[in-house]
Image (spheres, coloured by chain):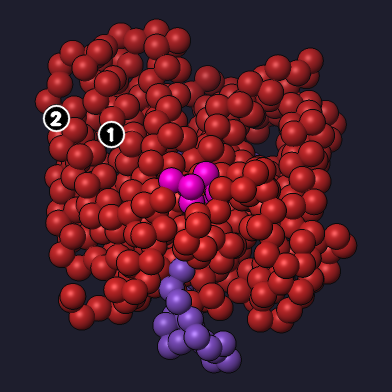
Chain colours: A purple, B red
Amino acid sequence: MAHQTTHKTEPDAWYKYGVAFLFAEMGMAICVCGYSLFMAFTGTGGFPGH
Amino acid sequence: MNKTHKVEQLVIATVGFFWCFLMWFATAAFSPSIADHYGLSIAALGLLASSALWMAPIGRIIAGWTADRFGAPRTFATILAVCGLVSIASGFTTNYTLLFIERVIVAIAGVGFVVGIQHVAQWFDADEIGTAEGLYAGTGNVGAGVGALLLPRVFGLDYQSAFIFLGVVALFLAAWYLWRGQAARDTQTQAATSKGAADWRGTVFVWSRYIAIALMLAYAMSFGLEIALNSWLSSYFAQGFGPEIAALGFTTVAGAQVAAGTFAAVQSFMASLFRPFAGFMSDTFQKKGWTPLPVVAKTLPYAPRLHWLGIALLLIVAAMLALTAAGLAGLLPVSIVALVALGLFISFGTGGTFALVPLLFPKRPGVAAGFIGGLSCSGGIVYPLVFAGGSSIHMGYAYTAIFLFIPFVLFFFWAARHEREPAEHGIGEFKPASE
């Protein structure tokens, strides 16, 4: 791991974008799973339809 | 050295890893086409599917050491170039035996994971390592799902063109990795890591630490379980919930496959796409100083991350037992809910483990990542045997949880109890004299 000499109190600028990206990925997972399960439980098919 | 930024290095590693996973699972995505083309039996098809995992344990161990010794860019570029060239060759092959051998070699791409873990660890600080490693590993893992969903839709039955396309892009990525990639944020970090890898006692030291073994078992409980479920769940739902799936309207074999595959994919999506969140939660535990578990150390600089991982492991055990209970009750919707939860908790485990590895072994991140990320892949081979071996198809999850996972969790709590330098505790004394 990168050597460090001090403890930072504020995250770097990139961090907020990284966190926004990971929340977008979570949203994508929930949407794909929700849509896919809806299709399956209504007998329509799996992602992205059949 | 090129002028660069750690985010650029994160992007290079993530794209490289994403493509490696795409190549790793491309064979599985085209299994039906290959089986049709060569007239393969079911047994031969199973052999082809399982061959993707053969090289992972030993390959990851070697790749981790190589990344420490020679730097991630050179190691990753070599992996991409070799796998890319063999992938292109496999697109022109007309002999099945040769194709099988070539695809086993292309599956070496899966070892790229530990190289990227080492690369990211060499660039990011301790307070953001969980999120950085999570973004890298979680986004890269999606390559497997994207391959399964998109490759057959884009290329149809033409697997040869797909293999050639994947190989050509891999060659471009290898060149990009060599051009823009830098092994570490400064030459001192790179030199210290390379020097550490040169001493074989350092590798044995990592392998013999109780905390490294505990993390390896934790990763076997999470990632090992994830890849085991990837190959098992479709069969499980088709056989374990046949009448319930038919009641939904999927009465044909093809329809039942679509439904069973859809339920199975839920676990894979959750485990991959929530992994960055798990790393972020590890960072959050660290910033807040949360240490709720008994026994586990509370005063280590990274103690809260140990507690986050401990919680994840307990949740995995609970979800496995819930999956068995839902199956025995014949409740398909409850089983899906348990599976969603299991995918989520698996992501907590995978993200939580690799938020810790670079902190516990800062001088040997590649060796540690290779050991923990390599041996744990054996779970993908072992667990399906346990799942299929019980008297009822639903009982395998409970057997795995009770006879394997609970002992793993107890070992983790025991190994993580030391309040000072847990890496000092292990079997024998192999610490290099220089330390």
- Label 2 – label 1 distance at C-alpha: 10 Å
Q: Secondary structure beneath disc 1? A: helix
Assign the N terminus of chain B to one quadrant of the image.
Answer: bottom left
> Can residue B323 be seen in the rendering of this structure?
no
Secondary structure character of the magenta stretch overall = helix
Residue that carries the numbered disc 2 in the rendered image? B89
Q: On the picture, is B229 further left or further right than B394?
A: left
* Residue found at x 75% / y 18%: B390
Where is residue A31? Give x, y as percent: 54, 59
Out of B188 and B308, give the one closest to the viewer: B188
Q: Going by the image, does B23 lie left or right of B98?
A: right
| Residues shaded magenta | B200-206
Label 1 is found on which chain of the structure? B
Does label 2 or label 1 sit earlier along the sequence? 2
Q: Where is residue B254 drawn, in percent x and y?
A: 48, 23
Which residue is depicted at the point 18% across and 45% down? B81
Residue at (83%, 28%) from the top-left corner? B328
* Residue B228 lies in quadrant: top right
Identify the disc placed on residue B169: none
The amino acid type of the residue labelled 2 equals Ala
- Residue picked out by circle 1: B106
